[in-house]
Amino acid sequence: MISEIIFIAISMVALWLGARWLVDSASRIARLLGVSDLVIGLTVVALGTSAPEFAVTILAALRGYSNISVGNIVGSNIFNLGFILGGVAIVHQLQITPKLVYRDGFFLLSMSGLLLFFFRDLTLSRIEGAVLFIFLLLYLGYLFWRREPRETEETPDVNGSWKDVPILILGFTLVLGGSCLLVDSASSLARAVGISDWVIGVTIVAAGTSAPEFVTSLVASLKGRHSIAAGNLIGSDIFNLVGVLGLAGMLRPLQIDPSATGSLYMLVGMIIIVILFMRTGWKLTKAEGAFLVLLGAIRWIMDFS
């Protein structure tokens, strides 16, 4: 158990360093390309921080563990919107742009509703998975076709260069490596204290694969990059639902237990709450963040019970 604790500490250091390089280089690349932090957060950063969910979900789907595959995505998305978005808002109040709410927030809500409809028979077919994945391609195409100019943030201007690309890749590598080490170590530690594999999957693994989102969004928020902080979480949830789960469904039809529908309904409900909070005053306050964390904690208690 001591070695697992040491590995967890090492993974957190790797996540923190990787997230700092990721945020800084992504912001400079955004300036170089002439696009906004929000688009970078919704695409480049979100794709990188969603890589752990992608690896776990695709591997579980190929091995026939549909409940773990779907549960990891749904659990990670709830964790993102509850613990992470709420926790980041508690540390530093987040300023929200209308586009994040009306364009990206409502797209996430509609895709969550579509996923809930697809699972009405407790199965996500290959065709339904393909539909989800096509929506992701259309969404990404629209983002870059209608890309808006970079917003003025409250941090000093920093000139970007193509030298930031290897820094971005190195940041991704540290974030992904740290998250994998964290998931393995935390899972081993949980089994050592007698927690079941199912509970590990929907709680610890979901939290571990969400660690890159947490560190990246927290660092971005502390640096004043609110568009990357919030866009990363919304973008990661979009990638998870329509990208990762869509691809997993295309590879192999996914079946879930009837009890899993409760988590799907909770995810839709949490997205609605987040959209409402973001719309009020175009910011996510510390009080609203605390409420989101409370919802996430209640969900964890329900899972463990």
Image (tube, rainbow, N blue to C red):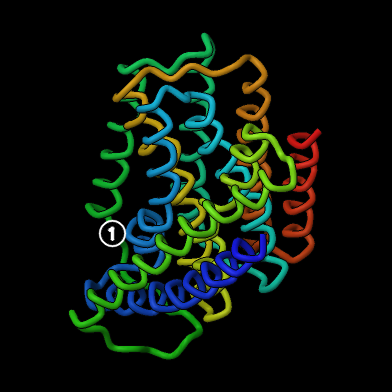
Query: What residue would you read off at disc 1?
Result: 147
Q: Is residue 136 above or below residue 218?
A: above
Q: Position of residue 299 (x, y in %)?
A: 74, 39
**What residue is drawn where x is 51% and y is 51%?**
209
**What residue is drawn where x is 31% and y is 69%?**
149
Within-10-Å neighbours for mark 1: few <14, some 14–19, many 20+? some
Side of 277 relative to 144 (left or right): right
Foreground of the two, 249 or 221: 249
Which residue, as the protein is rendered here, is positioned at the far left? Answer: 162
**What residue is drawn where x is 53% and y is 75%?**
13
Q: Is residue 56 above or below residue 221?
A: above
Q: Position of residue 63 (x, y in %)?
A: 39, 26
| Disc 1, SS | loop
Foreground of the two, 288 or 163: 163
Foreground of the two, 185 or 54: 185
Q: Position of residue 176 (x, y in %)?
A: 40, 60
Quarter occupied by residue 249: top left
Quarter occupied by residue 163: bottom left
